[in-house]
Image (cartoon, coloured by chain):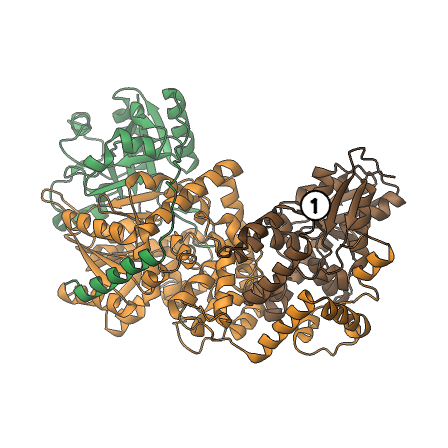
């Protein structure tokens, strides 16, 4: 699932749609998550207010991103957190590896981190002979099965209980098949507790990094995040550079938006605020805390005032749950770290339209994502923007790989279409053509795609324009 | 071992980008849940919402919680209780345990985690104080300290916590202000709203995945 | 015939290209419902498409040229512009602004946008249309287009009009919020996903137990009835304007 050049979206869509179990799993999961979200955000007025606050806060961050990052870095240093900067995922991976080498670390316990998925960190570390262990239950399940996550928040959402039972039985020595979820939970708890106790290093993501105090905030329910950041002697935190927020007082609304949107909770079990390594006199906590701040294309996205809105994302995953496309094809079909609507706008900007330009076609622009986005990212407009850049007809594209789709045929088709809509004579001729021949068109090209599951459109003998004229409707 | 050229390159791009993409950003509106003025109502809301997330809440007066704690420990057959010394609750614990033979032992956390780790991972319960509680989303505020390290509320399968009724605020925002959070927060501060939980298997809510399986809270008036 | 005693108004009618080509009866019905309220309707023969197909497909300049043409065609007077489609109305009301946001024509376009109304919301809110049902009892369901719902916010108005018809039982559909999979060129560029979506929508319509569905958007209708035709599902689809006109004329 790595960001390979051979990504074939069409084929992965076909495969995903053919998998009935997968579709059932996603339908069930997304229906449930939507319902839970609605239960928390039951008051539309308050929800709108909260979303506006979230939008304002994140937009403000983007207008002063370099200043806030400088402040965050300075405050972290004051707190004893060692800050590293990585332009690329390779650099970030190597920083992690160096830290492990420096501490002669072999076993790493990992809390959930989408940035680590973006880095393909596990694969990288395994290739170096290290043992990275996912501890979030969902991540643990898919790591056992050697798969990437299919959802930003619920990584194993594509698997049902029976499939998970099989994964446990096949991959954990001494475990026999059981569909009892509390037994499955007990097995994972038992295995992972031993790992926390003996791990050399712990890794986590960052949900919010507070610039004014140099505090790293971690949102979670399981307690694995706390385990990874408090038990091993070294804690490494990974964040995308857009995760910085200005002030502590910005946290309550953003945290509420994240919980409500992600899992339909008012609050998660744990909200962890880390301000550095163990201090003199303290009896626990890591002796070193490192923060790796990853760019990976983000600083470029900031340059465009429309596209920069992509960086407002707080990774709640609610756009996935509300997307009629995601709910049918699931996360893996997108062949990308971030699937669904947010992936459609983020991945082409990070990896290039030439590599991931097919993703923005997977939207009917129904606006369901925009309606629920907690920070009000205009996802449909950004999808349109990337479609524009895919053809780059005006030659003003800024996204890597822009214009990859330029085609003479499509250009002629749209120019011809335009003519029929702006020129009255052409419009009349077109309508006449449709009336005479529209119902006899050969089923090729677009019509073939259309009629694969539908009857041909029936064109009328007389257009509305004809009828209006006949009825004497005033023309002007 | 920070890569200085990476840092410089990133900031060069960020500065260039923020000028290129400069746009007006309005001052963000505030969001503060309406304060619940009445203390009893705040406590009631806290208790209701904490209980809804499978936290066992006991409302007690004064020092009653100590007796209740011993009762619960007996009922559940807990084999020991880890606590921190020299805290607001430690004297009461020590006094209550003094001379008691038929109760599971009280274990003080006195050493660094490196020496205490194995014992802690074998412990069956831990008890901590809290800085207070939040009513409208139901969570406790914990500021771990040298006396009560962070893992005390995480590793033992049962976590007892003592919350003072008059330290229950309406919202997180209120707690931030009341506690002078920015100036005073310790190395690690946290909110806890219930026992450890997950819904990663078929979105079925299950408790006790990594942290405590049981959270037992005494709301003391 | 008109039962609205208010002073005579004049409105423009934007029929939409799809109605023009494939559903002219629905378009005419919209005009008649407006006339019935004592409104004079102007139908400029030079009108074309709203531009949405190109706008959504990556051909912004073509969309803009077509949009500008419509702005000009409807610039003779400041009359409201009534559109029998939530999707085309949404395009004209909100997305024209996006298209022209950096252009000197912005303010002219903005004035145009402010005049755009979806048909059922204009009938319900502005004209306060009152209908007396003369048809026999019927059960049906309603399909809302995504843009009727999320851009024009006119779903409730459409339903309010249907609910005035006393012999009509409106059965709510499950997942009304969900897209039928049309999405204009989406249905051609991602035919398999679109097919899965329209299939599920037809299942949800079937589950209402009704033999008819109404909608205010002919794109969705062409998609849904097209799939029903292919699957031999005996459920009829009809544009809300055409249906109301039939019912009140008996």
Which residue occupies the extreme right position in the image?
C250
Residue position for label 1: C79
Give the camera-side residue of A16 and A465: A465
Q: Quadrant of the C terminus of chain B?
A: top left
Q: Is residue A456 visible?
A: no
Q: What is the tally of numbered marks visible in this picture?
A: 1
Q: Colour of chain C?
A: brown
- Looking at the image, residue B39 lies above or below residue A314: above
* Percent coordinates x, y for residue A11 in the rendering: 53, 75
Give the camera-side residue of A195 and B181: B181
Identify the residue at horizontal 36%, vertical 32% (top origin).
B171
Looking at the image, residue B43 sits to the left or right of residue A394; the answer is left
Residue count near mark 1 (Cα–Cα under 10 Å), binned few <14, some 14–19, many ≥20: some
Q: Quadrant of residue A84?
A: bottom left
Q: Report helix, strand or loop for mark 1.
A: loop
Q: Colour of chain A?
A: orange
Chain letter of disc 1 in the image: C
- Looking at the image, residue A320 lies above or below residue B32: below
- Looking at the image, residue A376 lies above or below residue C224: above
Give the camera-side residue of A45 and A278: A45
Chain letter corresponding to the colour green? B
* Percent coordinates x, y for residue A115 in the rendering: 33, 60
Q: Quadrant of the N terminus of chain B?
A: bottom left
Give the camera-side residue of C190 and A463: A463
* Percent coordinates x, y for residue C235 in the rendering: 79, 57
Identify the residue at horizontal 55%, vertical 50% (top origin).
C107
Q: Is residue A458 visible?
A: yes
Which residue occupies the extreme left position in the image?
A280
Identify the residue at horizontal 40%, vertical 66% (top origin).
A349
* Percent coordinates x, y for residue B82 in the rendering: 20, 38
């Amino acid at each position: 699932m790595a960001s390979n050049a051979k990504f074939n979206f069409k084929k992965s869509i076909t495969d995903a749609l053919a998998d009935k179990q997968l579709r059932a799993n996603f339908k069930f999961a997304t229906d449930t998550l939507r319902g839970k979200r609605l239960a928390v955000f039951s008051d539309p007025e308050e929800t709108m207010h909260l979303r506006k606050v979230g939008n304002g806060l994140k937009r403000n961050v983007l207008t002063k991103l370099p200043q806030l990052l400088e402040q965050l870095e300075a405050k972290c240093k004051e707190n004893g957190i060692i800050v590293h900067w990585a332009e690329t995922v390779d650099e970030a991976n190597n920083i992690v590896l160096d830290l492990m080498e420096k501490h002669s670390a072999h076993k790493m316990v990992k809390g959930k981190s989408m940035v680590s998925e973006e880095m393909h960190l596990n694969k990288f570390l395994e290739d170096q002979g290290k043992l990275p262990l996912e501890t979030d239950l969902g991540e643990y399940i898919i790591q056992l099965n050697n798969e990437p996550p299919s959802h930003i928040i619920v990584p194993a959402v594509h698997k049902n209980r029976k499939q998970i039972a099989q994964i446990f039985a096949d991959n954990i020595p001494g475990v026999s098949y059981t569909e009892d979820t509390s037994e499955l939970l007990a097995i994972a708890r038992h295995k992972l507790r031993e790992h926390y106790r003996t791990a050399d290093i712990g890794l986590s993501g960052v949900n919010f990094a507070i610039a004014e105090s140099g505090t790293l905030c971690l949102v979670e329910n399981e307690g694995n995040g706390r385990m990874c950041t408090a038990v091993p002697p070294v804690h490494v935190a990974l964040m995308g550079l857009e995760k910085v927020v200005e002030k502590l007082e910005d946290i309550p609304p953003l945290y509420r938006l994240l919980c409500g949107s992600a899992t339909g909770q008012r609050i998660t079990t744990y909200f962890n605020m880390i301000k550095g390594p163990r201090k003199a006199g303290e009896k626990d906590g890591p002796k070193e805390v490192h923060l790796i701040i990853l760019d990976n294309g983000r600083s470029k996205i900031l340059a465009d005032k429309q596209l920069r809105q992509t960086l407002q994302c707080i990774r709640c995953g609610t756009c996935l749950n509300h997307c009629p496309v995601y709910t049918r094809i699931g996360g893996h079909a997108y062949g990308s770290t971030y699937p669904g609507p947010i992936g459609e706008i983020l991945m082409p900007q990070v990896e290039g339209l030439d590599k991931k330009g097919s993703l923005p076609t997977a939207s009917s622009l129904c606006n369901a994502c925009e309606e629920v986005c907690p920070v009000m990212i205009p996802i449909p407009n950004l999808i349109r923007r990337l479609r524009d850049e895919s053809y780059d007809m005006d030659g003003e594209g800024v996204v890597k790989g822009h214009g990859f789709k330029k085609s003479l045929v499509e250009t002629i088709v749209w120019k011809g279409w335009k003519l029929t809509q702006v020129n009255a004579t052409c419009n009349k001729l077109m309508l006449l053509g449709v009336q005479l021949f529209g119902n006899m068109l050969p089923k090729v090209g677009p019509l073939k795609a259309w009629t694969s599951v539908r009857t041909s459109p029936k064109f009328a003998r007389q257009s509305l324009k004809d009828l209006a004229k006949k009825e004497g409707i005033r023309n002007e | 071992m920070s890569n200085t050229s990476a840092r410089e390159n990133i900031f060069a791009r960020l500065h260039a980008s923020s000028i290129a993409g400069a746009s007006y950003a309005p001052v963000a509106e505030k969001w503060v849940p309406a304060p619940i003025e009445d203390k009893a109502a705040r406590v009631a809301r806290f208790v209701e919402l904490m209980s809804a997330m499978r936290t066992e809440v006991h409302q007690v007066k004064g020092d009653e919680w100590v007796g209740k704690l011993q009762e619960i420990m007996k009922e559940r057959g807990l084999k020991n209780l880890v606590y921190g010394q020299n805290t607001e609750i430690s004297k009461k614990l020590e006094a209550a345990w003094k001379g008691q033979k038929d109760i599971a032992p009280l274990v003080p956390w006195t050493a660094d985690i490196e020496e205490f780790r194995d014992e802690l991972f074998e412990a069956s319960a831990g008890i901590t104080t809290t800085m207070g509680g939040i009513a409208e989303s139901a969570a406790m505020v914990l500021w771990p300290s040298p006396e009560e390290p962070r893992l005390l509320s995480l590793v033992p399968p049962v976590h007892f916590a003592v919350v003072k009724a008059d330290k229950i605020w309406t919202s997180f925002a209120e707690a931030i202000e009341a506690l002078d959070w920015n100036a005073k927060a310790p190395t690690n501060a946290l909110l806890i709203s219930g026992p450890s939980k997950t819904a990663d298997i078929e979105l079925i809510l299950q408790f006790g995945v990594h942290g405590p399986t049981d959270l037992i809270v005494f709301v003391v008036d | 015939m008109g039962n609205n005693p208010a002073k005579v108004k004049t409105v423009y009618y934007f029929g939409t290209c799809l109605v023009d080509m494939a559903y002219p009866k629905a378009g005419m019905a919209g005009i008649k419902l407006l006339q019935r309220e004592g409104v004079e309707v102007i139908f400029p023969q030079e009108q074309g498409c709203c531009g949405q197909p190109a706008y959504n497909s990556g051909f912004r300049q073509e969309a803009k040229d077509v949009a500008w043409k419509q702005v000009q065609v409807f610039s003779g007077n400041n009359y409201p512009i009534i559109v029998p489609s939530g999707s085309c109305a949404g395009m004209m009301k909100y997305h024209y602004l996006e298209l022209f946001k950096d252009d000197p024509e912005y303010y002219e376009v903005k004035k145009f946008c402010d005049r755009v109304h979806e048909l059922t919301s204009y009938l319900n809110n502005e004209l306060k249309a009152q209908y007396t049902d003369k048809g026999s009892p019927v059960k049906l369901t309603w399909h809302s287009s995504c843009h009727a719902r999320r851009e024009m916010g006119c779903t409730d108005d459409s339903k309010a009009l249907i609910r005035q018809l006393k012999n009509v039982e409106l059965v709510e559909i499950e997942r009304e919020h969900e897209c039928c999979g049309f999405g204009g060129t989406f249905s051609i560029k991602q035919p398999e996903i679109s097919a899965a979506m329209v299939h599920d929508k037809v299942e949800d319509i079937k589950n209402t137990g009704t033999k008819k569905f109404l909608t205010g958007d002919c794109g969705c209708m062409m998609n849904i009835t097209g799939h029903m035709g292919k699957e031999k599902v005996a459920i009829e689809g009809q544009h809300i304007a055409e249906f109301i006109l039939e019912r009140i004329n008996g």
